[in-house]
Image (tube, rainbow, N blue to C red):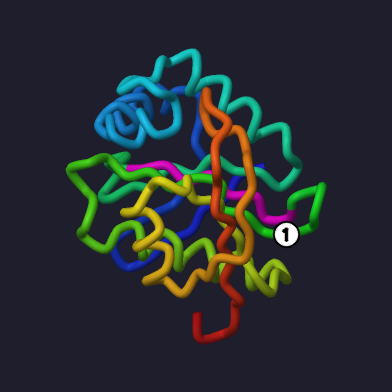
Amino acid sequence: MSLYLAGERLVLRSMTREDLTLTLEIYNSNPDYNFLRNGDDNVTLAEVEAEYDATLTIPTGYWLAICVADRLIGVLHLIVSNPSDQKSWISMLLLHSDYQRQGFGKEAVSLVEQHCLKAGSRNIHHGVIAHNAQALLFWGMLGYEQYRQVQAPVGRLTQPVLLVAKWLDEAS
């Protein structure tokens, strides 16, 4: 199953296994994030491959390449309808550090929100590592509100995760 979403500056497309080496570069351009989720600054290709395989086992799960002019600048994990709770989830959004704070994350999330709305979702969820202040600010600025804190596995660690959600409407 493949997905292709086009915006003003971005294209989100289903990733292939051939994209994973570039994806590893994206992960490792974010050592602070890697440390939050793994207790280590770097991620291995084997870990990226395992995440890729796990996401694709979910019937409506996608690993999306975030691209600008055919250049892979980020990755987004999307579950349109999680089999365990029937909710839409953005389970990860990660941009190469060179492309952060330029509006690409906001545009990628907007494209995914519109896709989920067209697929019948009325809200979309995300989990933020509780100690990731930058991510909490980003998701809050996009209108996501916290509704619960849980202990959850993230990368190699189990830690506090804040669950956030946004109600979707035609104006989103």
Q: Position of residue 13 (x, y in %)?
A: 48, 47
From the viewer's perspective, is residue 68 above or below residue 141?
A: above
Residue 146 vs residue 123: left or right?
left
Q: Nearer the viewer, residue 6 or 82?
A: 82
- Give above or below for 101 relative to 131: below
Tell me: 1 left or right of 50: right
Between 27 and 2, the residue placed more toward the observer is 27
Secondary element type, mark 1: loop
Residue reaching furthest bottom?
A: 171
Residue count near mark 1 (Cα–Cα under 10 Å), binned few <14, some 14–19, many ≥20:
some
Q: Main secondary structure of the magenta part?
A: strand
155 sits to left or right of 72: right
- Residue that appears at 30% across and 23% down: 41
Residue 108 at what x, y percent from top left?
Answer: 41, 59
Residue bounds of the magenta highlight: 74-81
Asked if residue 75 lies in the magenta stretch, the reply is yes
Residue 46 falls inside the magenta stretch: no
The disc labelled 1 sits on which kind of residue? Lys
Q: Eyeballing the image, is 111 above or below 89?
A: below
- Residue at point 36%, 64% (across, down): 106
Which residue matches tag 1? Answer: 87
On-image quarter of the N terminus: top right
Residue at figure coordinates x 23%, y 51% from the top left: 100
Q: Residue at x 47, y 45 (%)?
A: 129
Q: Position of residue 166 (x, y in %)?
A: 57, 71
Nearest the camera: 41 or 116? 41
Q: Give the image quarter of residue 118.
A: bottom right
Q: Quadrant of residue 138?
A: bottom left
Image coordinates for residue 91, horizontal then vertical, percent: 56, 47
* Count of numbered circles on the image: 1
